[in-house]
Image (cartoon, helix red, strand yellow):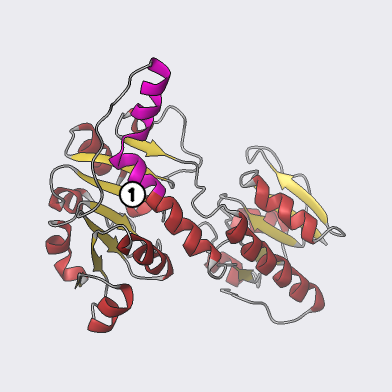
Amino acid sequence: MRILFCGDTFASARGSLRERLPADEFCVWVDRTAAPPVNETDILVPMMCRVDAAIMDALHPRLIQQVGSGLEGVDLNAAKARGIPVANAPGAAGNPESVAEHVILLVLALFRQLPLAQANVRAGVLGGPQGRALAGRTVCLWGLGATAASLARRLRALDVQLIGITRDPRAEKVAAYGLDACYGHDERTSALSRTDVLVPCVRLSDATRGIIDAAALAALPQGAYLVNAARGALVEYRALYDALASGRLAGAGLDVFWHEPIAPDDPLLALPNVIATPHVAGVTDWSYREIIDAVAANIERFRRGEPLMNQFA
């Protein structure tokens, strides 16, 4: 079968899938402003590229298979109208566990001013900068799913106060996540007002797009932090930039962006209180092993005409 990667990002995922399916033909559409390298494909794999009706009509894929969980870049209605099945591969434990590790990396890097510390080593400066201790701070997990559960287990060991925001703040969730407090969406201002580190853990949808807006950021205490490894569009860009540039937010750790890859000259990246990584929170050996196994298994099921796993359209 012919498998077309729509985009040249996440090279390790492409390489791993090639290894799993050595008999298949693989193509990569690198330049989206140019014509695709083929006129049709059996399986279209989006790699951070928008797959709309025009692309479907140009390539005539028989399956659109996402590597990972996010399907916001695929026009599901257009796929359904054309009878093209769409599936994802959310992974099992590896992805949320890996994302949780990366979130903690960003939190600690912000609190200890890691970029400045590295610059001081190169400049021969000893004993600076002074960092901030994470222990005793309040971390708010906005959204209580698999990633939040992985984060909660790790954060409890770091002696933080742990609170959550969720649609259904029942006592069972407080117990399951080990939260010190849990708030409903209508109580989010109260939760944010006591938050030192805000970590969005919700999926991107029409309901959650821009959910962290100027009002939400203003509700945080002076000197709070935002760490986002979920989706960039959960946060309003302008509101975040203004809060960081003014010093109201002490810093932000970002692994996801509004347009990916983010432009190297984006003004946000020039701010000294921003630490950015290139969408690698879930890019680990454990996470990718599970995800690529699931993608390859789904392609084999499609080849045999069997029902697909995680089919959305």
SS at badge 1:
strand
Residue 248, placed above or below residue 100:
above
Q: Residues within 10 Å of mark 1 (few under 14, many from 20)?
A: many
Is residue 249 visible in this depiction of the protein?
yes
* Residue indicated by mark 1: 227
Q: Is residue 224 left or right of residue 20?
A: left
Q: Residue at x 26, y 54 (%)?
A: 198
Q: Nearer the viewer, residue 246 or 101?
A: 101
Q: Is residue 137 left or right of residue 110?
A: left
Residue 68 position within the rendered picture, expressed as x and y whole percent measured from the top left = 57, 61
Q: Reply yes or no: does residue 55 show up in magenta.
A: no
Q: Reply yes or no: does residue 114 show up in magenta.
A: yes
Q: Nearer the viewer, residue 82 or 278?
A: 278
Q: Residue at x 56, y 50 (%)?
A: 48
Region in magenta:
105-123
Q: Residue at x 39, y 70 (%)?
A: 145
Q: Amino acid at mark 1?
A: Val
